[in-house]
Image: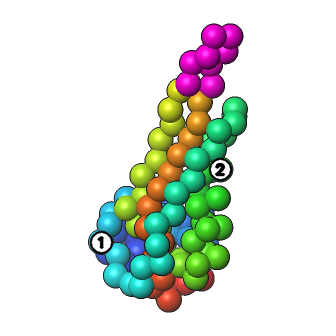
Amino acid sequence: MEERFGVKGTVQDGVFFTESPGVAGEPKGSVTVEINRQNANLFDVKAKMAAQARSRGADVIAGFTYGQKKHYFRVWDSEHWFGKGTAISTGEFM
């Protein structure tokens, strides 16, 4: 955990992730990811979100939320991970 822009968060693949919505910069739209496969994890979610953010010229994902949902089928159960947030370009570090 580190602090940037006056909020705490983490960095993955050059993108700063924070649960705080209050990061100043130019909004580049919302970023949403769902991974519907076994053995996925938070690292996979953040990697996909970071790629989306970078493709828009953003270096922060603010208001970051994530989780997993279980699905039950007749023969097996599975789960999927999801993440969402707002891509923001601060121009500080890319």
Q: Secondary structure at mark 2?
A: helix
Q: Secondary structure at mark 1?
A: loop
Picture coordinates of residue 60, whole percent (x, y): 48, 73
- Image quarter of the C terminus: bottom right
Whether residue 18 appears in magenta in the rendering, the answer is no
| Residue 89 vs residue 43, the one in the foreground | 89
Question: Relative to 78, does residue 3 appear above or below in the rendering?
Answer: below
| Mark 1 surroundings: few (<14), some (14-19) or many (≥20) residues within 10 A | few
Lower position in the chain sequence, tag 1 or tag 2: 1
Picture coordinates of residue 57, whole percent (x, y): 58, 82
Q: Which residue is mark 1?
A: 22
Residue 23 visible in this rendered orientation of the protein: yes
Q: Which residues are magenta?
A: 71-78
Q: Residue at x 53, y 27 (%)?
A: 70
Type of the residue with mark 1: Gly
Q: Label 1 to label 2, Cα distance in Å? A: 25 Å
Q: Which residue is mark 2?
A: 44
Residue 25 placement: quadrant: bottom left
Residue 76 placement: quadrant: top right
Picture coordinates of residue 50, whole percent (x, y): 60, 66
Question: Relative to 82, does residue 4 appear above or below in the rendering?
Answer: below
